[in-house]
Amino acid sequence: MEYLQPGHYLHLIRQFVDKGDVVEVEKDVPDVREDYLLEYLSDIMHNPLIQAKVLSSRLVGQIFYETVGRFVLECLHAENFANQRVSGERGQMEKTREWSIQKKRDSWQSLVDGIGDKHEEDGFDIDFLKKRFHHDGWKDPENWEMLRHEWKHAIDSQVLRQTTEHIEKKKSLVAKSLQQKLDHAQKLRNEGVSEEQALQAWTMMEGQWTETEFEKKLNIVRIQNQYPEIGDVVRLMGRMTDTDGKDRVAIQTGKSQQLSHSSGSDIEGISIGRDFNALMPMEWAQYTDADMEKLFLHKYMTSKLQVFHYKSEMVKPARHLRSERASRRGPMIVCVDSSASMSGVPQKIEASLLAKLEQTAETLDRDCFMIDFSVDIHPIELRSRRQMKSMERMGMRVKDQENFSKGLFPFIGGGTDAQKMLNLTFALLDNNNDRYMNADVLWITDFLIPRTDKELMQRFKEYQKTGTKFYGFKIGDGHSDWEQYFDKIYEIRYVPPRRY
């Protein structure tokens, strides 16, 4: 049986993170080849400490997904490398089918001895095969098929042995790395860093994780605290709750946990267990207190947490969102100015705003198309980029032909030309077969952009009549004469850093 593809293992990890589905492995089943990766995933997912942390935090869930996913991919790469090393031997095995009678007679003994020496640890029974080949047994085609079968089994066993040795050597390192990241996540929680911002910083990371690099990204995300307009424009771009709306929108009230049951009167009493969705407030207080965390985890492992007991038992993960009526405002098209005038502080403000937009698009399951514009344009689908970066953090290298691949922006000297950007924006809005019809459009720029031809400028009003909204996020001082073409433009001013 061949091992499953990387995507299948990653899907199992994602199901655990999103829904709490634990991998179950049937051991000692006849004729079924052992899958060391499924066993590893099953073991780690059955760990109650891991369950408690992963299922109570989106940030921890993403850390777990990428850390364990990276380890799985490393193991598959190691297996692939081991298979490549024995590819020549597999070819040699197949060539025995073409041997002449004379070659079989002259070479069978040295062949069996060579295989036996090479695969002594892999279950190759050299004595048994020698007995079969003695006394003209080498003439029997059935014996040669048996030899090839045992040889193949020995090669497969070698690959399995080498890969299993790899996983055993690396498991402790992975556990240490995962614990280090989880400890840092706990530290952030104790310091009052919101999970939303911590998650944004995590998704901005590239390559190997370090606390120093994470803090740099978190500082960029924290720009949102300095400029509340970032949150305002993102909320405006998202779907809004509306009692008369025809669509549904996921809403989360309060803080990071929310009980989701049929009604307040559904509470029947207090019980003992470890249901995160029904924890009493005093238990949550222990969980968020670093000094009490070990006590909380002990009570979790022993199922002795105090929980509400419900008649309906409509259990849902703590971070699932409830649904309310809403007006769907369509997908988003974000135009990001990467001209020379936006370098420095504006670059970081753009990155912070873009991180929040990406997370909003993912949370609300909205399509988001970004157009990087200066003297030229570079289009990219944001959710695809987010997934690509996650794959790269796990070691699955994707050929990078996209701008913005490193999270910040490659700035180009010269001015800004709006014509190409507008042509692409309007093409997306006009395409009846594309998912970007009726999109909300956001410009992130200093608005020091020359007007383009009158025909393009007139089309702003035509799209607004059909419900398209145009928003602007103006960074920096300076007069702009674009206001008449936008539904709303947010303006923020920043203080340039002093240089002595």
Image (tube, rainbow, N blue to C red):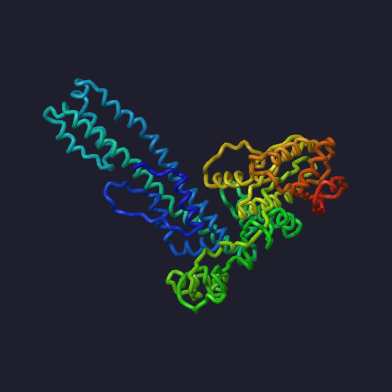
The reply to whether residue 277 is in sight is yes
Is 253 in front, or is 175?
253
Is 420 in front, or is 201?
420
- The image shows residue 109, relative to residue 336, as above or below, that is above
Is 384 on the left-hand or right-hand side of 128?
right
Q: Residue at x 35, y 30 (%)?
A: 88
Is 257 in front, or is 201?
257
Q: Residue at x 74, y 55 (%)?
A: 233
Is 435 on the left-hand or right-hand side of 276?
right
- The image shows residue 421, relative to residue 476, as above or below, that is above
Residue 430 in picture, x, y percent from top left: 70, 39
Residue 93 appears in which quarter of the rendering?
top left
The outermost residue toward the bottom is 269
- The image shows residue 374, relative to residue 325, as above or below, that is above
Is 411 in front, or is 449?
449
Residue 103 appears in which quarter of the rendering?
top left
Residue 486 in picture, x, y percent from top left: 81, 48
Numbered-mark total: 0
Location of the N terminus (image quadrant): top left
The reply to whether residue 291 is in sight is no
Residue 345 in picture, x, y percent from top left: 76, 49
Is 94 on the left-hand or right-hand side of 246?
left
